[in-house]
Image: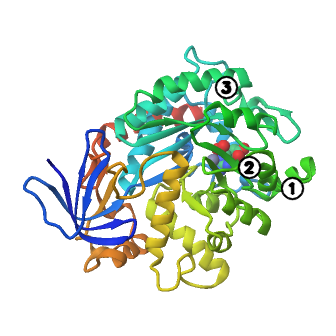
Amino acid sequence: MTGFFFNEALLPGGWARNVRVTMDKSGRIERCEIDTSAHAGDIRHTNALPGMANLHSHAFQRGMAGLAERRGTSDDSFWTWREVMYAFNDHLTPDDVEAIAALVYCEMLESGFTSVGEFHYLHHDRDGSPFADLAEMAGRICAAAETTGIALTLLPVFYRWAGFGDQPAHEGQRRFFNDPDRYARLSDASLAHTSKLRHGRLGVAPHSLRAANLEDLPWLAGLRPDDPVHIHIAEQLREVAECEAAHGKRPVQLLAESVELDPRWCLVHATHIDAAETRDLARSGAIAGLCPLTEANLGDGVFPAPDYRAQAGQWGIGSDSHIRIDLAEELRLLECGQRLTLRQRNVLAEPDQHVGRALYQSCATGGAQALGQPTGRIEIGARADFVVLDSKAPVLTGRSSDTLLDSWLFSGDGRQVETVYVGGERVVEAGSCLARDMISGRYCDRLTQLMQRINA
Ligand code: NGQ
Ligand code: ZN
């Protein structure tokens, strides 16, 4: 049987040498042997890392990267960025969304992400009316995943209110809005699309405690009882203050008291948490969904990673607004944000441990849990998702195992990702997603037209 043979691979227990992996028909790892030799016909690589999950994506926002970097008349903030984002998404057609998502997923694969959680809320047509297929846009997201080969956990977003206290959703949010009945139908219609994908999964996602109220949460969490539940939370200080004003509690505290937080849950950002919330989140087994590049770009703040980690809190990473899509850079900023605030080095690792491995393994396993995808570990039963680095690249020369990983994450970027497999199928070769040319050509065509419409 054809197998993979790696001179070294990062397994759950650490780096192993001369690793041979075989898989079953569904693309799951059947055997994993170390200190062995290659069989004739094996696919050979110098190294392999487990595939990384990108646990939080709003694919369409890739199309507006760089369009919100001009200072306005007053202080700019997350909230002024959001106005620009709303104005941008007003123009998007299903063809635009599919073309943008395909480029996003292509870029993700090329940087080492093998699965994505699409936190999808652009549901309706430009005037706010539902498409004939309520899940038309979800179908476009699935089509983009199919084109690229990335594993997809689709998270259709429940968005009902404009803010705390059940403020009615406003004009800029018309394309996101659903009542509970229509959301349940949207979820079913989305399943018709995700179930056609080889590595598709469907979860649920109350947008935030601003856009879903406390009564909405239990039935949403119960709608798909075995699947992931994602929510934005405590990203901005203003949102914490509004939550305290409306409910007398901080967001994570309020959420933890309103629902049973458990390993199905992913709390995206959770930037502003106090000591008690840090403890409760860590204990719950839920995932903190950190998006370092977006959180920096939007001026959100810095997650209390050392305290959370000290209490065995689990996390993963997402590229969220896609101001950049680069796995190495996300992990680097997760660590370097702490270095800048604490004025220390090598913060997010145990004594004598390499930071690269600590970051990579914790985010790969946490991200896989958040997406309900059998990935993030090279072990029996996991999907054969592998990321192979170009060991001949200048920044990786002479490195192996932990120094290879540290050098990639701290001094490299997506350019050192050579080959990527999802479920044993090659999706990136010589650094390029297989459908790269078609996808970028279509993206550029759509974006040219879109920018003309926006600037008209
Ligand atoms: C989003 N993005 O849904 O795209 C949000 C902005 C909001 C981030 N939170 C909108 N990064 O939170 O209301
Ligand atoms: Zn988000």
Secondary structure at badge 2 equals: helix
User: Left or right of 270: which side holds 144?
Assistant: left
For the C terminus, the image quarter is top right
| Residue 231 x, y percent position in the rendering | 67, 45
Secondary structure at badge 3 equals: helix
Work out whether residue 84 or residue 121 is closer to the camera in this orientation and state it. 121
Amino acid type at image mark 3:
Tyr
Q: In the rendered structure, are the residues bearing label 2 and label 3 in contact, judged by CB atoms less than 8 Å apart?
A: no
Between discs 1 and 3, the one toward the N terminus: 3
Secondary structure at badge 1 equals: helix
Name the residue at the left extreme. Answer: 40
Work out whether residue 196 or residue 232 is closer to the camera in this orientation and state it. 196
Q: Residue at x 73, y 66 (%)?
A: 279
Q: Name the residue under label 2.
A: 80
Label 2 neighbourhood size at 10 Å, few (<14), some (14-19), many (20+)? some
| Residue 396 x, y percent position in the rendering | 30, 74
Marks 2 and 1, how far apart at CA = 18 Å
Q: Name the residue under label 1.
A: 241
Q: Residue at x 48, y 52 (%)?
A: 368
Marks 1 and 3, how far apart at CA = 29 Å
Number of numbered discs overlaid on the protein picture: 3
Q: Is residue 87 visible?
A: yes
User: Left or right of 142: which side holds 250?
Assistant: right
